[in-house]
Amino acid sequence: MDPVGIFVGILVVLSIFVLFSTVKIVPQGFEFTIERFGKYQKTLTPGLHLLVPFIDAVGRKMNMMEQVIDIPSQEVITKDNAMVQADAVAFIQVMDAAAAAYEVSNLQRAIENLAMTNVRTVIGSLDLDEVLSKRDDINSRLLSVIDAATNPWGVKVTRVEIKDLTPPADITEAMARQMKAERLKRAEILTAEGEKQSAILRAEGEKQSAILEAEGRREAAFRDAEAREREAEAEAKATADVSAAIANGDVQAVNYFVAQKYVEAFEKLAISPQQKLVIVPTEMTGLVGSIGGIGELTKTIMEKETPRTNGSVPPTVSGSL
């Protein structure tokens, strides 16, 4: 075998090795730490870099993008001694590649254990009702504590979220019964309030109805009284007119007045509910004859009173007419 060929082959292999050891390409989203004789020297950002062969070497390849870490599920005892199954998720981002590489041995496992410990601490300081109703407060407290603890590691914790909180089956059943009783209570309260409002509105309606009815009765009584007053005035005026007519010798007015009273009396007699038998004249001319007789009687009386001197009082018809 030719020694020159062997030498050339070794030289080519060595050149390739030196080239790969010298030229380093860092992809986007990552940073590489460089160690010189095992000691941290610098950090390479994304791009093309040249290293000193056989002296510089890549130490750690750190992911600088935001990462999601699942926090394992665990049983946690609350402040009121209730057992709750809790799991969470954390979002982290490496801000300092050197600190994340050399300040902690296993970054992801360290964050998982730190988060589990703080989940137990935070939930253990709250009652079960607070744990179930104040999830945002729990997330805020966890984020504050875990972010402060991971700051020396060059890590920024952006969010911590509780994924699930599961109480025991008996507590879940008791909570369901309590919720049902509470809803029934609210339903009964609403029903009672509705009945109360209905009774109030009904009473208001009856009150308004009674007021309007009383006002109607008052208006009707006022109008009835006014009608009776006008009727009495008309009757008095008619009586005065008849008296004046009699004084002036108008026999027809007397006949009309007597006939009107006669007809009214006969009408009341006919429509009386206690009346069993009504006697009606065989001829209506009898009624006219009676009225005429009364008129003649009145005329005779007036003629006898005519010789009186001026200023004497006119004759009047007595109540027997």
Image: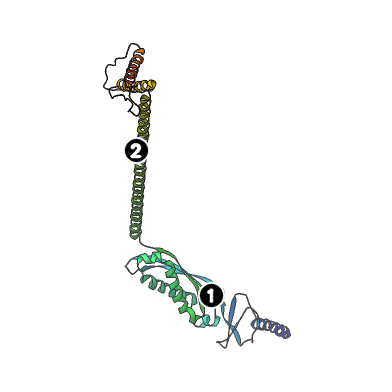
For the residues marked 2 and 1, what is the alpha-carbon distance in whole angstroms?
A: 93 Å
Identify which residue, 274 or 287, lies in the foreground. Answer: 287
User: Which amino acid lies under the numbered mark 1 shown in the image of this protein?
Assistant: Gln
Residue at the location (46% across, 73% down)?
A: 143
Where does the image place residue 54, in percent across and percent down from the top left? 62, 87
| Res 225 seen here | yes
Coloured how?
A: rainbow
Q: Tell me the quarter of the image containing the C terminus.
A: top left
Residue at the location (49% across, 77% down)?
A: 107
98 vs 212, left or right, is right
The tag earlier along the polypeptide, 2 or 1, is 1
Furthest residue in direction front, as rendered: 309
Examine the rendered structure and indicate whether residue 40 appears above or below residue 86.
below
15 vs 35, left or right, is right
Residue at the location (42% across, 67% down)?
A: 135
Q: Which mark is residue 195?
A: none
* Helix, strand or loop status at disc 1: strand
Q: Which mark is residue 221?
A: 2
Identify which residue, 125 or 16, lies in the foreground. Answer: 125
User: Which amino acid lies under the numbered mark 2 shown in the image of this protein?
Assistant: Ala
Please name the residue that numbered disc 1 is placed on: 93
Examine the rendered structure and indicate whether residue 178 appears above or below residue 67.
above
Q: Tell me the quarter of the image containing the N terminus.
A: bottom right
Disc 2 versus disc 1: nearer the observer: 2
Examine the rendered structure and indicate whether residue 307 appears above or below residue 17.
above
Identify which residue, 296 or 87, lies in the foreground. Answer: 296
Where does the image place residue 101, in percent across and percent down from the top left? 52, 81
